[in-house]
Amino acid sequence: MRYFVITGHKAVADGSFKLDDLAGGAGRMDILARCINSAFVLSHEIRRDAEIYLVMEGGDDAPKTVRINGNSVRYLNPDERSTASLIRNALLKKIPEGHEVQSSPGVYVSKMSFADVIEALSRKGNFVYLKEDGTDVRDFQFPEDPIFVLGDNKDLTEEEEQCLLAKGPAKISVGPISLHADHCMILVQNEMDRREAE
């Protein structure tokens, strides 16, 4: 399995945003929609061996986490607007304390914080922190069940980074210049695909 954790530092957690204002009023929800696309969408199918955790940290209802599982997700299309609609529908659900609620097939929402997500995933695989000063991805041996962690258009906060570093992640870089989060995900996926095809 390939896991991805993306922190939406300003992403509006209450689902009140408009689908025609994803980059503004929704708190850069457009970035999270593109990350979903990079996690799952292939030319004519969906990656079934991937799962993404989107941690929404914006607004009064934060934090919330939307989890999407590639093996069971339905109604996922490659355009940002319909993907953001899946996210919004999840965020509008009532969530009992300590529970995760399914909003549509393969899409789940909970009140988990970044620290909660890191703790929960620590039992599922090995953390890989995408960071510009990390080991070049081409020289990196991917662990089994990697859990890739990255920020949206902002780096992890100091508190988030300390939480992750406490788990002893590997650090990798996808290249010499700074790229968008969704592009970093594509490069990592491609590198793994190439090796699995050898």
Image: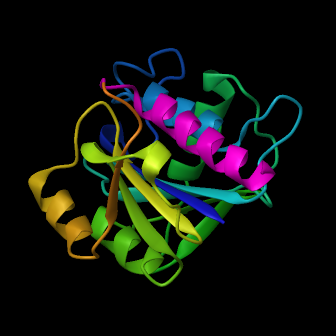
For the record, the magenta segment spans 177-198
Q: Is residue 14 above or below residue 146?
A: above
**55 is within the stretch colored magenta:** no
Report the quarter where the N terminus lies. Answer: bottom right
Residue 39: in sight, yes or no?
yes
Q: Residue at x 45, y 45 (%)?
A: 137
The picture places residue 134, in percent across and down from the top left corner, at: 28, 48
Q: Residue at x 12, y 60 (%)?
A: 159
**193 is within the stretch colored magenta:** yes
Name the quadrant containing residue 161. bottom left
Q: Residue at the bottom extreme?
A: 123
The picture places residue 183, in percent across and down from the top left corner, at: 50, 29
Q: Which residue is at the front of the view, 69 or 111?
A: 69
Q: Which residue is at the front of the view, 178 or 64?
A: 178
The picture places residue 139, in percent across and down from the top left corner, at: 44, 50
Q: Main secondary structure of the magenta part?
A: helix
The picture places residue 125, in percent across and down from the top left corner, at: 51, 76
Q: Is residue 122 above or below residue 159?
A: below
Q: Is residue 170 left or right of residue 161?
A: right
Q: How is the image coloured?
A: rainbow
Q: Residue at the right extreme?
A: 44
Q: Residue at x 30, y 54 (%)?
A: 62
Q: Is residue 35 left or right of residue 180?
A: right
Q: Is residue 61 above or below residue 28?
A: below
Q: Which residue is at the front of the view, 42 or 65?
A: 42
